[in-house]
Amino acid sequence: MEKDPKVAIIILNWNGFSDTIRCLNSLVKLNYSDFRVVLVDNGSDGDEGDRIKEMFPDVHLIRNSVNKGFAEGNNDGIKWAVENNFGYVWILNNDTVVDKNSLKKQIACFSGKNVGVVGSKIKITGGERIWSKGIDLIRISIVPPGIAFFSNIDEGKKDTADRSRREMKYISGCSMMFRTDLENIFFSDKFFAYCEDMELCLRIRREGCRLVYEPGSVVYHKATRSSGGHKFNEITAYYGYRNKIIFIRDAFGLYVLLLLMPFYAACFLRDIAKTVLFYDRKKILIRAMMKGFIDGARYILR
């Protein structure tokens, strides 16, 4: 029987003890023979990393004294995986629970020609609604009318029995597996959090590799339905709006960004209005959104 390739599963924890425990309990049940969980504790309060290590002694623990963000925190785990000769890395959110066959299904995709990254069918925990099958850079819809930037594919739709793999341009960092022999495997630290997954996907595609969505790899994500499937707080408000501008500027150039800015600004004003109407802590969130937008605009002028 052919041996399973070595996979490092990187879980980033930042004050998410209960979610991380649920995630690790699901990983124990994986139908796969050769994987190691790498827990990167990003400066959590109360020695969470050590407490989790006591409960799961086989986990390799990396302790960071401060919150280094999604990008740099995961990079610490990726570096360890490369140094220890793992052929594949699976970046997985700590607030997920995985199906027992999810890893085996993803690994099977790499037998395809030039496959560099594989993503999962990510469903919202507790139901049959989709959270993401990948990411659209720009989506224009007729019903309801509007334009969206950086939106999850099929978010909120009822799950269907789709069985066909298909190529994607962007895979969500909530569940992203890639080969470690690629030239580009580290997230850019300029993003801290949000859009770093899309930027890495773009570099890997430009390396000549394909990105594939595997519907048989099912991951359940603890998304907040009331906020459109996202945990909307000051961090997401600031980095979300800042990093979209930075990503478009660096990936496609100033002229493309200037062409898209009127549409992006309209979406930004729409989101400000939604925040005023539907969210608590409105002033704090709007202040963070405004600062993110302004800092992104300043980046253009560098």
Image (tube, rainbow, N blue to C red):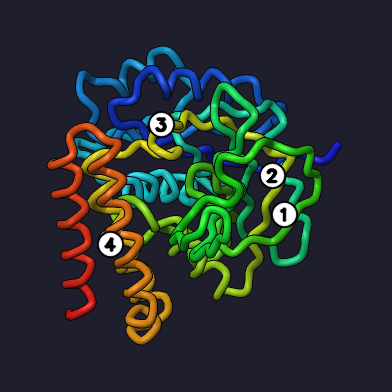
Q: Earlier in the sequence, mark 1 or mark 3?
A: 1
Q: Which residue is mark 3?
A: 226
Q: Circles 2 and 1: CB distance less than 8 Å?
A: yes
Question: Which quadrant of the structure image shows residue 277?
Answer: top left
Q: Is residue 49 left or right of residue 20?
A: left
Q: Position of residue 51 (x, y in %)?
A: 32, 15
Q: Nearer the viewer, mark 4 or mark 1?
A: 4
Q: Amino acid at mark 1?
A: Phe
Q: Position of residue 173 (x, y in %)?
A: 48, 48
Q: Secondary structure at mark 4?
A: loop
Q: Nearer the viewer, mark 2 or mark 3?
A: 3
Q: Which residue is mark 4?
A: 190
Residue under the image location 32 percent in, 50 percent down: 193
Q: What's the CA distance linking mark 2 and mark 1?
A: 7 Å
Q: Position of residue 96 (x, y in %)?
A: 51, 30
Q: Nearer the viewer, mark 3 or mark 4?
A: 3
Question: Which quadrant of the structure image shows residue 141?
Answer: bottom right
Query: How many circles with numbers are drawn on the protein?
Result: 4
Q: Is residue 172 left or right of residue 32?
A: left
Q: What's the CA distance linking mark 4 and mark 1?
A: 29 Å
**How would you rate the neighbour count of disc 4 (Cα within 10 Å): few for under 14, some for 14-19, many for 20 or more?**
few
Q: Is residue 247 left or right of residue 144?
A: left
Q: What's the CA distance linking mark 2 and mark 3?
A: 30 Å
Q: Which residue is mark 1?
A: 110
Question: Which quadrant of the structure image shows residue 104?
Answer: top right
Q: Position of residue 117 (x, y in %)?
A: 61, 56
Q: Amino acid at mark 4?
A: Lys
Q: What's the CA distance linking mark 1 and mark 3?
A: 36 Å
Q: Earlier in the sequence, mark 2 or mark 3?
A: 2
> Which of the numbered marks, if any, corresponds to residue 106?
2
